[in-house]
Image (cartoon, rainbow, N blue to C red):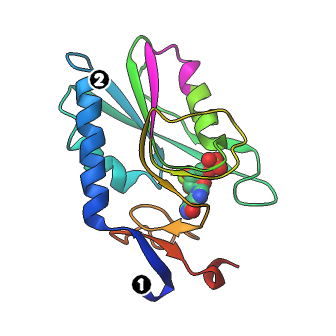
Amino acid sequence: MHNDIKRVLFSSDSLIQRASEIGKQITEDFKGEEVIVVAVLKGSFMFLSDLLKNIDLYCRLDFVAVQSYGDTVYSGDLVLIKDISVDVRGKNVVIVEDILDTGKTLDFVKRLIEKKQPKTVKVCVLLDKKTKKASTIKADYTGFETDDVFVVGYGLDHAQLYRNLPYIGELKPEIYS
Ligand code: IMP
Ligand code: MG
């Protein structure tokens, strides 16, 4: 598995450290209030875990799952596979996603949540890729910026593999091309 990685971009320690910083920032920003964390399955799960351990607030957790269809993995229309079941009306919501690439996924999820009339909606992403965005969506909390290369690990996959790597690395192009 490690042989498929061209280079390590973010070490396990640096990811845990950054997740903890963002968790503490969210704690500060919502002091005295409750938040509902809505995580996007599946890629966000490791970041989510390290983040939540550092959110020192009353906090509820729910998940959404979306799937894209179309000619490439990212360009197709998005379909909601799993909606949230917690009631977010009048509540503070923090959406947690692994990576902001074209922005389509987060745009879709943010609109879905906004329709449910929460008090506030913030977007938290581990990685923001320097890609041409198809949407104007911006993250309120960002772990790291990355170059436009295909990355895996720490929850991120290629063909459902590599999610269990403790670090984030660039996948060798011959693996996915
Ligand atoms: P967007 O809708 O184009 O912003 O794409 C976001 C989704 O594409 C993320 O939730 C990831 O699942 C996936 N994605 C984008 N880039 C990568 C990558 O480099 N590695 C793994 N998944 C990626
Ligand atoms: Mg995803």
| Residue beneath the point at 30% across and 48% down | 19
Q: CA distance from mark 2 to mark 1?
A: 38 Å
Q: Number of callouts in the render? A: 2
Crowd around label 2: few <14 · some 14–19 · many ≥20 (10 Å): few
Label 1 sits on what residue type? His
Snapshot quadrant of residue 25:
top left
Label 2 sits on what residue type? Asp
| Pick the front one: 6 or 49 | 6
The percent position of residue 102, horizontal first and vertical second, equals 67, 47
| Residue beneath the point at 61% across and 82% down | 175
* Residue 147 sits above or below residue 78 on the image: below
Crowd around label 1: few <14 · some 14–19 · many ≥20 (10 Å): few
Snapshot quadrant of residue 168:
bottom left
Quarter occupied by the C terminus: bottom right
| Residue beneath the point at 35% across and 27% down | 36
Of pointers 2 and 1, the one earlier in the residue sequence: 1
Q: Secondary structure at mark 2?
A: helix
The percent position of residue 70, horizontal first and vertical second, equals 79, 55
Residue wearing tag 2: 29
Residue wearing tag 1: 2
Q: For marks 2 and 1, give the one nearer the viewer.
A: 2
Q: Is residue 135 left or right of residue 138?
A: right
Residue sitting at the far right: 71
* Residue 35 sits above or below residue 151 on the image: above
